[in-house]
Image (cartoon, helix red, strand yellow):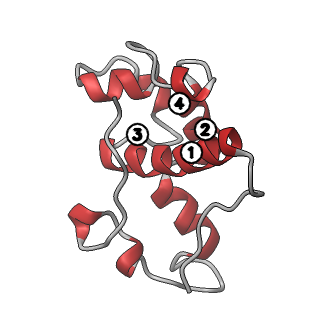
Amino acid sequence: EPLGPVVRQGDDQWLNIAKWTLFALLNAEELGITQANVEEMKKSDNPSVKRFLGVEGAYGEGLGLDKDWAGRVVSAVGNYGEVFDRNVGPETPLGIGRGLNALWNEGGIQYAPPVR
């Protein structure tokens, strides 16, 4: 059963924030950013990592958020894989493997627009 972020009709700003938060969790996993390494990754030479964490650019500006919002989300809950594993993954009572919930580059179908 497909599940995803849902908000009340007519609240487009909240929908965009919810949608881009999910995308941020996916991008963080793809970029190798975890709850444990957010601060260390701010020193990365990778421009995508720098934009994602708000070191460069204005990633959150279009959403009405500050530039480091995505890094703060990952600091609070981890990346998509960490959230999945903690809540429904193999070490939980549900014991669900990633399967199609893996990233696109790891045999799954999870993909997010790039950080721009």
Q: Mark 1 is on which residue type? A: Thr
Circle 1 residue: 21
Q: Earlier in the sequence, mark 3 or mark 2?
A: 3
Q: Earlier in the sequence, mark 4 or mark 1?
A: 1
Circle 4 residue: 71
112 to 110, vertically: above or below = above
Q: Mark 4 is on which residue type? A: Gly
Q: Which residue lies at the image location 46% right of the left edge and 60% below the top edge?
A: 81
Circles 4 and 2 in contact, beta carbons < 8 Å: yes
Circles 3 and 1 in contact, beta carbons < 8 Å: no
Left or right for 77, reference 82: right
Q: Earlier in the sequence, mark 3 or mark 4?
A: 3
Distance (Cα) linking label 4 and label 1:
10 Å
Q: Secondary structure at mark 1?
A: helix
Distance (Cα) linking label 3 and label 2:
11 Å
Circle 3 residue: 33
Q: Which residue lies at the image location 37% right of the left edge and 64% below the top edge?
A: 110
Circles 3 and 4 in contact, beta carbons < 8 Å: yes
Circles 1 and 2 in contact, beta carbons < 8 Å: yes
Displayed quadrant of residue 32: top left
